[in-house]
Amino acid sequence: MTLFWRRLREQRAALVAAGAVALLVLVALAAPLLTALEGQDPTTYHPDLIDSARGGVPVGPLGGISGEHWLGVEPQTGRDLFARLVYGARVSLGVALAATVVQVFIGVVVGVAAGFGNRWVDQVLSRATDVIVALPLMVLALALMAVVPSGFPRPVLVALVIGLVAWGNVAKIVRAQTVTLKELDHVAAARLSGWGSVRIARRELLPALAAPVITYAALLVPANITVEAALSFLGVGVKPPTPSWGQMLTSADVWYQAAPQYLLYPAGALFVTVLALTVLGDGVRTALDPRAASRLRIGTGRGREAHS
Amino acid sequence: MTGHLTGLRSLKALPGLTGFPGLSGFLLRRLLGALVTLLALSVIIYGVFYAAPGDVAQITCGPRCSPAQVQQVAGQLRLDDPLYVRYWDFLQGLFVGHDYSTGTGTEHCAAPCLGISYQSDQQVTALIWAKLPVTASLALGAMVMWLILGVGTGVLSAWRRGRVSERVLTALTLAGTATPVFVIGLLLMILICGTLQWLPFPQYVAFGDDPTQWAWNLLLPWLSLALIEAAKYARLTRSSMLETLADDHVRTFRAYGVGERSIIGRHALRGALAPVIALTANDVGSMFGGALLTETLFGLPGVGRELVHAVKTVDLPVVVGMVLVTGFFVVLANAVADVLYAVADRRVVLS
C-alpha cells in the first residue's frame, strides 16, 4: 500500500489531477456552505435580474456578475449560476460515484460467479456479459429511462441505470482474474479443506481482485460523469429544478450570443472534472501496475534516436 | 543484404484466406454465436421493457384520458395478454410479418416487423428505415475523418516518441478523450457557425438532392464526432505501434539496417492494423444505433434523435425496435470485426 502511494506521488500529472479532484469533492461537499456564504440558493428565481424585454437576458455586465451573484444569473429564470454550478458538482460526482459502486458490485458478483461456477453458469453469465458490453451504453441507458415511473427521484435513477447497463467490462476483468486465481495453490488448498464457495470468494479471491478492480473503477468514474451529463443534456437525466451540468448545456445554445458564460461555466466544469479524473485514473493504473507504463516506454530509448 | 530481407518478409507474408483451415470453422461458429446472441437479446429487451412497471396505456393515451379510453387503448395494445404470447407475436412479425388491427381495419406489417408506434401509428421498421440514411451519412463520414486524424496522430506520436512533440500530441489526445462530444460540438458550432459564420448551422440535406450541400452541412457534425473518436484511435494506434516496436522481429530489421521510416511505416503500423480495424467496426456498428448526442445537438433527423423522442414520449415499440436494431448492427459489426481481425492477425484463429 505504501508502495502504491509512493508510485502515485512520483507522477506529477497525477498529483495535480488528484489536487483538482480533491478540490472538486470539497466544493461538492461544501455546496450548501458555499452558497450560504454567497447568500443564494440554486432554485430561487430572480425575475428582477433578467431583462424580459430582451428575451430574458441577465441584467448587467458578464451575465449579471455582482457581489451577490458571484457568477451571474441564469438567463430567463434568474437563478444564481454559482449555486447551480456547485450543486451541479454534487449531482455529477454523486451520481458517477454511486453508478460506479453499482457497476463494481454487479461486475464483481457476476465475474466471480462466472469464473468460479460450473461450466453452465460460466456460459450463461459470460454470454450475458458479452451482450451488455457490446450494446452501446448510451442507447441502453436512454432506452431504460422510458420504462421507469416518473415519480422516482431522478439522480438515484440515473445512477442506477448507468450502473445497470455498464458493468460488463468489470465482470470480464474479474472473471479472467478469477479463472487464473482458481488455479493457485492457496485457493486450491482452501477448496480442499472444504470451504464453501462464498467463503473462498470472500477470503481468497476478493483481496487479489482489488487491484485490477480499483484500476478499472478509477477510469469508470469520469466515464460515468460524461454519461450522466449526456443523459441530462438529452433531457432524460436529472431534471430541473435539480441542477446538473449536462442539463445546463441543453439550453445554452439558445443563449450563447447574449450570455456566453452560461455555456462556458458548465462546459469548463465538465471538461476539468473529466480530465482530472481520467489523469488520476491513469496514474492509479500506473501505480498499481508499473509494468503497463514501462511496456509503453520500450523503444523510446535514446540510443536509437541517433540514426533515426 | 536485400536478399536476406525479402526472405524475412516472405516468411512473414500471410497465407491466403483459403489457405487457413481454421478460418471457415471460425467464421461459422462466430455467425451462429451472433444469431443466438440476437435471439437472447430480443427476449431480454422485450421482457425488460414490457414487463417493467409503469402504466403504458395511461402514458400512451395521455394524461387527460378517461378510464374508459385508457381501457380501450390497453385493449388495442393487447396489454392484457400474457407477455409470452405477445413476445411470440412479436417474433412472428419479425420473421414472417404480422397483421395488426388499427381500430378501423387491419394493417399488414411486412416481414422484419418491429411493431407499430404507439404515438404516430407508423410501422417501426419504416420509421427506422426513413431515418437510417441520415445516421449512415453521419457515421460513415465521421469514420473517414476520425481514421485519418486518429491513426495519423498515433503514427506521428509513435514516430516522435520521447520528444516534446509527442508529449504535446499525447496531451491533446488526453484532452480529446476527456471532452464530451456535445461540449466540443456546441463550442465548435457557436464558434464556426455563430461567431465566424464560416459554415451554416447544420441542416440535413439528402445526398441525392445535393451532394455538395450534403457534405457542407455535415462537415461540422463529422468534425465534432471525429475529434472525440480520433483521440481514442490515436491512443490505440500509438500503444500498439510501440508494442510492435519492442518486438524481436523489429529488432532484427533494425539489425539489418532497415531505416526508421520503413520500420514505422511498414512494420509497426501493421501491428496497429488489427486493433484499429476491430475498434472501427465496433464503433461504426454502435453508431448505427444513432449518434444520439451529435444528432440531437445539430438537429439532424436521424435514428438517434428519433430514439430520444421515443423515450420522451414512452413510445415503447419504437424504443424496443431501435434497441434491437442497434443490437443487430452491433452484433453484425462485432462479427465483421472478429473476421477482419482474424484475417489481419492470424494468431487469433489459432488460439
Image: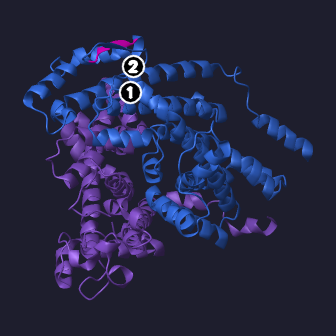
Chain colours: A purple, B blue
**Residue A290 at least partly seen:** no
Q: Nearer the viewer, residue A66 or A6?
A: A66
- Residue A262 position, x and y percent, is 37, 71
Number of numbered markers: 2
Q: Which mark is residue B317?
A: none
Q: Main secondary structure of the magenta part?
A: strand
Point out the residue furthest to the bottom here: A67
**Picture layout, residue A300 above or below residue A192:** below
Position of B231 with respect to A73 (left or right) is right
**Picture layout, residue B141 above or below residue A94:** above
Q: Which mark is residue B113?
A: 2
Q: Nearer the viewer, residue B39 or B216?
A: B216
In the rendered view of the protein, which quadrant contains the N terminus of chain A?
bottom left
> What amino acid type should be assigned to the residue bearing mark 1?
Val
Residue at image mark 1: B124
Q: Which residues are magenta?
A: B97-102
Q: Chain of mark 1?
A: B
Q: Secondary structure at mark 2?
A: loop
Name the residue at 26% across, 70% down: A84
Name the residue at 65% across, 42% down: B210
Dot 2 crowding, Cα within 10 Å, few <14, some 14–19, many 20+: many
In the rendered view of the protein, which quadrant contains the C terminus of chain A?
bottom right
- Residue B197 position, x and y percent, is 58, 65
